[in-house]
């Protein structure tokens, strides 16, 4: 006997088989009853099963009628009549109809329900009618009885549970859960835990608001499928949320922006983020260190920069982050001058002594629209080193060029400077057209700039104590009329815009509020105008000072090696120097400047003297020792309880202390020395030196020499009693990171760079040229103490270089000069 389960509606399916004719009518009756009193909920309902015999097959009508019976019987009648339609097709064998009842409850368990044929009123017989009107009685074989039982429901099962889902928080997470119920019960879904929502009917889970906080975090959802009897095994899925990095956009990245000196410009750095996350911008680095101010708005990405050094190129690394991922790019900022005119005094290197030297003054740029009608330039120099001879108009403006008509110069005392005038001053004048005659200049400005405006010709002193010295030649202002250019029409006067020294990068030193006389450019009073209708002068000229670097004798000679054969103090040197006194400079045929420099045998700064010849002969015969080159002396110093001490005999000291420090005579611990100190507004500067007069002076000092108490020492410089420089080595551990100035400086071809490490540290030392390009670098990982690096620059070009020390978050940059 078959069984039926409590708690669920039951359908008894009726199978029909038609193996005879297709033109059949049906008239069948069925009854459902329980022989032992089982009851079910609700009446019997006739059920036309989907996809079986459509009602249209019975064109005269079709009905399924329920007749509730008594004593536990329910009767169903099924009638189908057709005239010309199909009815039951020939060969049909299927289940077109069924009988559906409600469910049994658990109290009916063990009882029975039966299905059997029944009389159908009014005919009294259930049958179907075939073709020709014959009554056909199908075989039934009932009753069919079933035992009612109570059984636990079969759990619903999710069929597509996975272990993990991967997706970006930029988009919506979605997953369609599928489930089956073996008993055909209706299924619903529910989200037990985790983010998002789930459609209870379709099982589609959706999460639309994932954020950066979810990226890399542990996110899990738990979903259950349920039927009316309960829920099945839950499905647990790990949700892996990813992110997409922001992207910095061109054209700003990889480009160069020109910014006029002293002007503030903005650069808009843009980035996109696929997830539309809030972005934060920052400047990761600037190489070399930015002179001026530079910042970036962390929200908008707008860089604001105000450079203070001319012709400096900075590489700026910009970063953007969404708080999880980031992107970087580089751009360049170049500081330039916005002034239309530029004048530069040449910086001449390796200038030999005792001869003539020409220093060009160059027009580096000009305004082609306005032209150049004339100039009045005042230049200062040191006449103890340079003896001015004459000035000459540059070729581009002279007879072979633009054919300017007027050019002259004058030099000597100029006005009353209250004793503050430079020892040498020269005024240089030029006018493109001085009359309206037949001849006119071909041009006021050369077609190509830069071009030499005029040359200054000097005789360089032969005083050998000046070797290796840098001698400045600079623009100077006594009144508003000095260092002025005129346009071609003569109705505009151009004055200083910037003033810079001859080094790179060019630092603007112009200051219009110091008054005359000055090296710092035209003053405020020059720009007040001459009254109504009178034009005011225009700030339009960049001035760059120059000078000469006198060659170091060591680079062209060896003292006492007159014939430059590499062997000093030999008899041939004495013969060569003797020939000079007879023949003059014609005796020097190898390298005149080198042989002159080598002749200062007695080191008195005067070359080619008879005293040099006498001393040379004494050295050759062994009666005197050669004068040695002055090399640095290495000594140790220490600072104990605020007292500075040194372990060698010294002749002087220069100490710079941080802040305003009260230093008295009682703090000087070295007997017989003199001390002066003064606060310069930032630091306290202390000089210790031998007295100029007095009878109890000793040769120098050693040991403890100055009590600075708790002051911080910014710098310490010592010298021996003979005036030799001193290389300091600390006898104690440094208290802070510090990068020291290289020595020697200027240098050729090598120099040493030292720095202080208060703790064991990994360090990087990089050297850059003025274009910001890295020339060389050094790295190390050393114990605490003083570290020294030797730099060999024989293959480098002359000029200014920057060296930067990076130790963790500490970074410091200094400047050095290579002169060849």
Image (cartoon, rainbow, N blue to C red):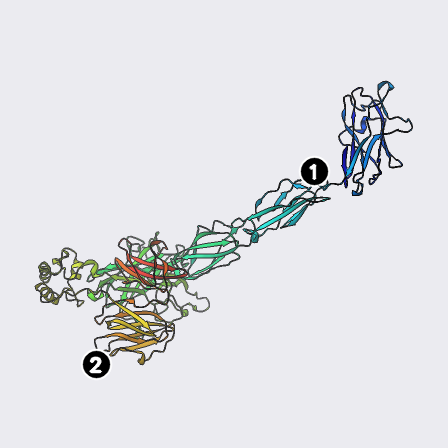
Most foreground residue, 766 or 98:
98
Tell me: 592 left or right of 243: left
Most foreground residue, 248 or 610:
248
Q: Which residue is mark 2?
A: 696
Q: Position of residue 262 (x, y in %)?
A: 43, 62
Q: Quadrant of the N terminus?
A: top right
> Circle 2 — which element?
loop
Q: From the viewer's perspective, is residue 661 above or below residue 488?
A: below
Q: Which residue is mark 1?
A: 182
- Kindly check if marks 2 and 1 are in contact, taking CB atoms under 8 A apart as contact: no
Q: Residue furthest right?
A: 122
Q: Quadrant of residue 749?
A: bottom left
Tell me: 600 left or right of 797: left
**Which comes sooner in the sequence, label 2 or label 1?**
1
Q: Quadrant of the C terminus?
A: bottom left
Most foreground residue, 26 or 304:
26
Q: Position of residue 41 (x, y in %)?
A: 82, 41
Label 2 environment density (alpha carbons within 10 Å; few <14, some 14–19, many ≥20): few
Q: Position of residue 10 (x, y in %)?
A: 78, 36
Q: From the viewer's perspective, is residue 710 above or below residue 538?
A: below
Q: Which of labels 2 and 1 is toward the front?
A: 1
Question: Distance from label 2 to label 1 (Cα)?
Answer: 119 Å
Q: Quadrant of residue 606?
A: bottom left
Look at the image and tell me whether residue 770 can be seen. yes
């Amino acid at each position: 006997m078959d069984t039926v389960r409590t708690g669920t509606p039951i359908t008894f399916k009726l199978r029909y088989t038609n193996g005879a004719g297709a033109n059949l009518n049906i008239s069948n009756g069925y009854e459902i009853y329980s022989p032992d009193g089982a009851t079910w909920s609700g009446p019997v309902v006739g059920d036309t099963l989907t996809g079986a015999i459509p009602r249209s097959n019975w064109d005269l009508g079709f009905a399924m009628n329920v007749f509730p019976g008594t004593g536990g019987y329910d009767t169903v009648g099924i009638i189908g009549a057709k005239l010309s339609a199909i009815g039951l097709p020939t060969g049909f064998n299927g289940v077109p109809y069924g009988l559906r009842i409600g469910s049994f409850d658990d109290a009916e368990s063990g009882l029975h329900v039966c299905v059997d044929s029944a009389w159908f009123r009014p005919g009294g017989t259930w049958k179907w009618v075939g073709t020709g009107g014959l009554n056909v009685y199908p075989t039934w074989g009932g009753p069919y009885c079933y035992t009612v039982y109570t059984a636990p429901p079969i759990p619903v099962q999710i069929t597509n549970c996975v272990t993990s889902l991967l997706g970006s928080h930029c988009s919506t997470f979605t997953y369609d859960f599928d489930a089956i119920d073996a008993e055909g019960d209706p299924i619903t879904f529910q989200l037990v835990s985790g983010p998002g929502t789930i459609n209870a009917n379709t099982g589609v889970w959706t999460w639309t608001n994932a954020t950066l906080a979810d990226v890399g975090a542990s996110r899990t959802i738990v979903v259950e499928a349920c039927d009316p009897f309960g829920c099945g095994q839950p499905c647990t899925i790990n949700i892996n949320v990813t992110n997409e990095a922001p992207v910095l956009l061109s054209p700003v990245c990889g480009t160069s922006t020109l910014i006029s000196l002293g002007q503030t410009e903005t650069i808009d750095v843009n980035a996109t983020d696929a997830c539309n996350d809030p972005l934060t911008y920052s400047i990761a680095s600037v190489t070399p260190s930015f002179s001026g101010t530079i910042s970036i708005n962390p929200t908008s990405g707008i860089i604001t920069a105000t450079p203070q050094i001319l012709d400096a190129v900075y590489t700026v690394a910009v970063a953007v982050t969404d708080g999880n991922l980031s992107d970087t790019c580089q751009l360049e900022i170049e500081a330039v001058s916005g002034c239309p005119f530029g004048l530069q005094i040449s910086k001449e290197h390796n200038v030999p002594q005792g001869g003539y030297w020409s220093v060009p003054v160059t027009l580096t740029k000009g305004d082609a629209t306005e032209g150049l009608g004339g100039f009045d330039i005042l230049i200062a120099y040191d006449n103890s080193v340079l003896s001015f001879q004459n000035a000459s108009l540059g070729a581009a403006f002279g007879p072979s060029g633009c054919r300017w008509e007027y050019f002259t110069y004058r030099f000597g005392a100029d006005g009353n400077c209250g004793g503050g005038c430079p020892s040498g001053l020269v005024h240089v004048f030029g006018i493109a057209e001085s009359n309206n005659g037949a001849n006119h200049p071909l041009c006021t400005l050369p077609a190509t700039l830069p071009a030499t405006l005029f040359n200054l010709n000097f005789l360089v002193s032969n005083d050998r104590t000046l070797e290796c010295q840098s001698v400045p030649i600079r623009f100077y202002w006594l009144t508003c009329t000095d260092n002025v250019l005129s346009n071609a029409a003569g109705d505009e006067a151009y004055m200083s815009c910037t003033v810079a020294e001859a080094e790179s990068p060019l630092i603007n030193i112009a200051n219009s509020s110091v008054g005359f006389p000055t090296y710092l450019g035209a003053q405020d009073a020059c720009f007040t105008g001459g009254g109504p209708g009178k034009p005011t002068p225009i700030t339009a000229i960049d001035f760059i000072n120059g000078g000469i670097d006198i060659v170091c004798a060591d680079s062209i000679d060896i003292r006492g090696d007159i014939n430059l054969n590499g062997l000093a103090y030999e008899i041939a040197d004495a013969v060569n120097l003797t020939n000079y006194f007879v023949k003059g400079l014609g005796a020097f045929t190898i390298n005149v400047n080198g042989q002159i420099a080598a002749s200062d045998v007695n080191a008195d700064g005067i070359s080619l003297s008879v005293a040099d010849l006498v001393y040379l002969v004494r050295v050759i015969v062994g009666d005197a020792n050669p004068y040695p080159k002055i090399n640095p002396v290495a000594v140790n110093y220490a600072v104990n309880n605020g007292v500075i001490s040194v372990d060698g005999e010294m002749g002087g000291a220069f100490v710079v202390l941080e802040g305003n420090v009260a230093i008295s005579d009682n703090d000087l611990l070295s007997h017989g020395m003199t001390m002066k100190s003064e606060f310069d507004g930032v630091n306290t500067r202390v000089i210790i030196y031998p007295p100029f007069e007095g009878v109890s002076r000793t040769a120098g000092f050693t040991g403890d020499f100055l009590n600075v108490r708790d002051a911080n020492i910014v710098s310490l410089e010592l010298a021996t009693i003979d005036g030799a420089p001193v290389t300091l080595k600390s006898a104690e551990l440094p208290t802070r990171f510090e990068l020291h100035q290289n020595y020697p400086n200027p240098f050729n071809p090598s120099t040493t760079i030292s720095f202080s490490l208060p703790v064991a540290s990994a360090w990087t030392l990089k050297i850059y040229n003025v274009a910001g390009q890295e020339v060389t670098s050094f790295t190390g990982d050393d114990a605490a103490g003083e570290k020294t690096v030797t730099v060999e620059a024989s293959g480098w070009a002359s000029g200014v270089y920057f060296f930067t020390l990076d130790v963790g978050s500490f970074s410091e940059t200094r400047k050095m000069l290579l002169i060849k």
